Image (tube, helix red, strand yellow):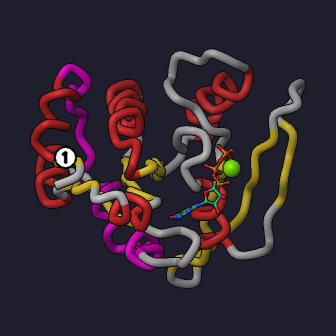
Amino acid sequence: MGNPNVGKSVVFSRLTGANVIVSNYPGTTVDYTKGYMKIKGEEAEVIDVPGTFSLEPKDVAEEIALKMLREEKPDVVIDVIDSTKLERGLYLAFEIMEKFDYPLIIDLNMWDIAVGKGIEIDLKKLREILEIPVIPTVAISGEGIKELADMEKIKKVIMTKEKKPMHEHLGEILERIEGVGK
Ligand SMILES: Nc1nc2c(ncn2[C@@H]2O[C@H](COP(=O)(O)OP(=O)(O)OP(=O)(O)O)[C@@H](O)[C@H]2O)c(=O)[nH]1
Ligand SMILES: [Mg+2]
């Protein structure tokens, strides 16, 4: 899951490889892609959900993203965030955390661009506050993808998940973890 244009499909390809199926969501022109990744010899289905800014849909693609989140009942959700657009990424992450019980992993993608722009994100603090894995990645080079697909970590997330109300703290959290241009 994630906002539009954050690198979801590149991350998806890195996780799944070539063997994927593109489908139309029934009754719409919205596409989504399914593939598989091997986890200790077992196959896990991976879905590249259409991009959405929030769980209050503003168009058909966003509606489908929400529907798929509901209907697919994933064992774990990977929320891909553009590291240079942390605020709007976390907005969706908090919505997912508040409205669903799915274990969540945050992928801070486009890490290379954030570094290039001098955007500093305090990963340690972000992990402490959110209490979930936060993995920086550069999907186009593959950097961080191994850490993202670390099954032991994913299993731990699945087992220890509990709900926390976060949304009202978004501003405060951003102040604590992000120093732009320092
Ligand atoms: N520099 C950089 N570019 C990236 C990275 N990940 C993806 N991109 C580029 O960002 C653009 C968008 O990537 P996509 O994977 O299509 O993004 P998406 O989230 O699937 O986009 P939608 O499906 O349209 O919502 C592409 O041009 C990618 O090559 C990254 O980590 N660093
Ligand atoms: Mg895509």
Q: Which residue is mark 1?
A: 178
Drawn side of residue 57 relative to residue 78, left or right: right
* Residue positioned 75% across, 52% down in the render: 33
Taking the image as drawn, is residue 77 in sight?
Answer: yes
Which quarter of the rendering shows the C terminus? bottom left
Residue 74 image point, x, y percent: 53, 46
* Residue positioned 41% across, 73% down in the render: 151
Quadrant for ligand 1 reads bottom right
Taking the image as drawn, is residue 101 in sight?
Answer: no
Residue 15 image point, x, y percent: 59, 71
Q: Is residue 166 magenta?
A: yes
Drawn side of residue 54 relative to residue 169, left or right: right
Residue flagged by tag 1: what amino acid is it?
Glu
Residue 64 image point, x, y percent: 69, 28
Instruction: Please tell me which residue lies in front, 144 or 21.
Output: 144
Ligand 1 has an atom within 8 Å of the beta carbon of the residue at disc 1: no
Q: Is residue 55 magenta?
A: no
Which quarter of the rendering shows the N terminus? top right
